Image (cartoon, grey):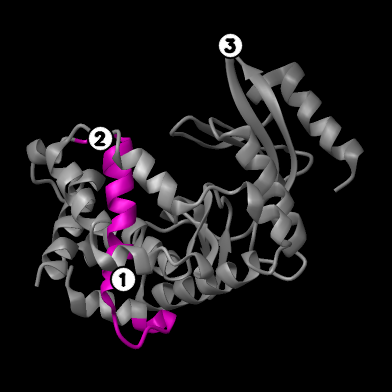
Amino acid sequence: MKQQMINEIVNEYKMKGSDAFSILYNQNNTLVMEHPKYPEYLLKLSDKDFKSSQIQSEILASITLKNKNISRIHHTQLYNDQGKTKTMELIDKLPGISKREYSETDISNVIRATKELQDSLNQSEKKHHNDLPSIGPLFSGIIGQTSNHTLKSIANQIQNDTAYERFLDAENQTIIVADMVYENILIDKDAVYFIDLDPMVLGPKRLQCAILITSNLLLQTNLFKQLSMELIRRYMGLWGFETISREDLIALTVFPLLILSMKKVDIDSLPENDDSIYYKLKTILLFIMSELDR
């Protein structure tokens, strides 16, 4: 992408604001817009950490020649939007749509593509990995701030489990995309595209499959109603897991624990509501803990 084109798109937003663009997405403090003259690129303003965006941009620049299913970040800068500091990114527009519910074919394709994504990320230069946070300290720091007794008790049980140390094996650290929500995954027939890989962390390889399952697949209404170890084994089997170890069960608790803690959810007072993401995450977490307690 030429610098002249980047300047034209960014400057037009600075002068005219979103009126010069078609707004495609405006939720969760994130605004995504399409320029009428350059519809192959999207302008995105979000609360994303600027340093995180720059690191991600460098990593993606080094792997998008090999993996065409990742939306490359062509430009990043800080931007003052009505008194609030935002991170501005200019990214590729990729085909496909995000789906709230997947068919079995979609699930197979998303699992395959996510595994290929992880392989691609870990072919990037190791110098890019040094600035990424490790999941162990990140997990401890976030969990340590929760005031909910139940979450704190579960986290202590996990961290005192001998399998947790094996799970965090330093020799098996790879780049992990820590949030695989359906909005960031586009499906176009059998092709799968990824449009936002933030946040990235360093963690054990088995964690990527666990995060896909707990931040996406099991949150889908259809699959949530079928929550079982048989379902989890089936999808981990598609990834390549022949058996599910205690370390794998621990990996499945990480995303629910982090999100429920970060959002300061009082899981003891959550009403039963299958449409609530927090209720679903609580249910998944308690289910996995019951498997660990067997």
Q: Position of residue 100 (x, y in %)?
A: 36, 56
Where, by quadrant of the figure, is residue 174 drawn?
Answer: bottom right
Dot 3 falls on a residue whose secondary structure is loop
Dot 2 or dot 3, earlier in sequence: 3
Q: Residue at x 26, y 66 (%)?
A: 162
- Which residue has dot 1 on it? 247
Q: Position of residue 62 (x, y in %)?
A: 76, 60
Q: For the C terminus, which image quadrant?
A: bottom left
The range drawn in magenta is 237-265
Dot 1 falls on a residue whose secondary structure is helix
Dot 2 falls on a residue whose secondary structure is loop
Whether residue 233 is visible: yes
Which residue occupies the foreground of this view, 81 or 188?
81
Q: Hey, what amino acid is under mark 1? A: Glu
- Which residue has dot 3 on it? 83
Work out whether 18 lies above or below 51.
above
Q: Circles 2 and 3: CB distance less than 8 Å?
A: no
Q: Position of residue 35 (x, y in %)?
A: 72, 37
Q: Residue at x 72, y 55 (%)?
A: 127
Q: Residue at x 44, y 53 (%)?
A: 135
Give the foreground label among 2 and 3: 2
Q: Residue at x 77, y 29 (%)?
A: 10
- Mark 1, Cα crowd under 10 Å, few <14 / some 14-19 / many 20+, is some
- Mark 3, Cα crowd under 10 Å, few <14 / some 14-19 / many 20+, is few
Viewed as shown, does residue 221 lie left or right of 176?
left
State the mark number for residue 146.
2
Dot 1 or dot 2, earlier in sequence: 2
Q: Hey, what amino acid is under mark 2? A: Thr
- Label 3 to label 1, Cα distance in Å? 45 Å
